[in-house]
Amino acid sequence: MATAHLLFGSPGVGKTTFAKQLEARGAVRFTPDEWMCGLFGEDPPAAIFPEKASALLSLIQPIWTRCLACGADVVLDYGFWKRSERDEARKIVRGVGASSILYAVTCSETEARDRIARRNNAPDRSLYIAPATFEILKARLEPLGSDEDHVVISTAAA
């Protein structure tokens, strides 16, 4: 049975790095930030971002669901900040006869901020996240419910 790996966590915690590790094990990785950057640049205006992100996720969904239906594991590197998004993804996954694993990817806030700063200065970065944007995005994170089975992945530096 194919598995959808759902990655939950705030910006900078290491979701994409973990997603790439799962991809290396044979899963098909879907990282919307990379698609957004490729289509709309590394710092799309806030005024258009929600509309474009929603449209992008609508375009990606038939692809990842088809992968699951064909027996391929997928990694959804979405963040899943809202409970409703997590619930909807799990429902879709069940609908195609696959299973899902929800991962809570974590590290300290200081480390997440440092990672974002390094990523913002990297020549091959995806989306730029300004410090003020980090605060806005972090505030949108709805904690996992006590009824949401998940695996904790700590990406803290050793």
Image (cartoon, rainbow, N blue to C red):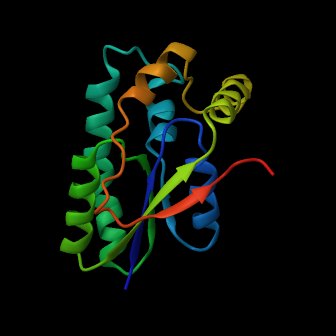
Residue 138: where, in percent of width, then height? Answer: 45, 29
For the point 67% across and 30% down, which residue is it? 110
The answer to which quarter of the image holds residue 128 is top right
Against 14, residue 64 (above or below) is below
Residue 148: where, in percent of width, then height? Answer: 32, 62
**Residue found farthest to the front:** 146
Against 145, residue 24 (above or below) is below
Residue 44: where, in percent of width, then height? Answer: 44, 19
Residue 121: where, in percent of width, then height? Answer: 73, 23
Against 67, residue 77 (above or below) is above
15 displayed left or right of 140: right
Against 145, residue 21 (above or below) is below
For the point 26% across and 37% down, which residue is it? 55
136 displayed left or right of 107: left
* Of the pair 106 and 39, the residue shown nearer to us: 106
The answer to which quarter of the image holds residue 32 is top left
For the point 54% across and 52% down, which residue is it? 105
137 displayed left or right of 16: left
The answer to which quarter of the image holds residue 1 is bottom left
